[in-house]
Amino acid sequence: MTAIVHSLLEAPLWPLMNKFYRTHQSSMKASKDAQLWVARAHEIVAALCLRPAANGFWLTGLFVAPALRGQGIAGTLVNTAVLSCDGPVWLFCDPALQGFYESLGFRLAQDLPQVLHERLVRYQRNKAMIAMAITLECRAPAPGTAPQ
């Protein structure tokens, strides 16, 4: 398999992220007010958005091409994106994904910024959803660097 590169998607290429989501019949959409991160092997194979929120970021839209799931692509993409952030990162997920995110250093969020708390309450009206967060202190160092 071709090497997978994880990086920010340059603004002129943002439409490719929505094309990736549509190709896989995902309802997710790239947010223009976010950092758009992708994993690529010639074409996009995974994507996520990091939207500014309070004094940190809200991770949304994580999606990996179904044929490539279970290969660590999501975890590496999340870690790469989160390491670029200078504040906490929050996300909402199905409770079944709690273990996956805990393996990346996320924990159940104790204190959500008000704007995210309100959004979570709205989402929970329609489906099971939990909030998780990772702080600067809990992040894994980038591969090849020493822990701080």
Image: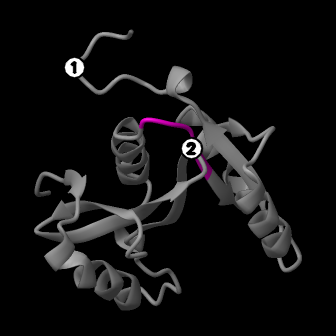
Q: Is residue 113 magenta?
A: no
Please tell me in which quadrant of the rendered image residue 11 appears: bottom left
Q: Magenta span has 87?
A: yes
Secondary structure state at the residue bearing disc 2? loop
> Circle 1: is it few (<14), some (14-19), or many (20+) Cα within 10 Å?
few
Q: Which residue is denoted by mark 1 in the rendering? A: 144
Q: Position of residue 129 (x, y in %)?
A: 78, 62
Left or right: 11 as drawn, with respect to 88: left
Question: Who's the residue at 41% across and 63% down the image?
Answer: 48
Figure quadrant of the C terminus: top left
Residue 8 spot, x, y in % from top left: 24, 57
Q: Which residue lies at the image location 51% right of the left edge and 27% below the top edge?
A: 136
As measured in the structure, the alpha-carbon distance from the residue carrying label 2 to the one carrying label 1 is 28 Å
Name the residue carrying label 2: 55
Look at the image and tell me whether residue 86 can be seen: yes
Q: The N terminus is located in which quarter?
A: bottom left
Q: Residue at x 56, y 38 (%)?
A: 88
Residue 125: mark? none
Give, as a three-letter code, the residue at label 2.
Asn
Residue 110 shown left or right of residue 8 in the figure: right
Left or right: where 16 falls relative to 41: right
Under circle 1, the secondary element is loop
Q: Is residue 57 above or below residue 128?
A: above
The x and y percentages for residue 78 are 42, 48
Residue segment shown in magenta = 86-90
Give me the residue at 34% from left, 84% from top: 18
In the rendered image, is residue 95 in sight?
no
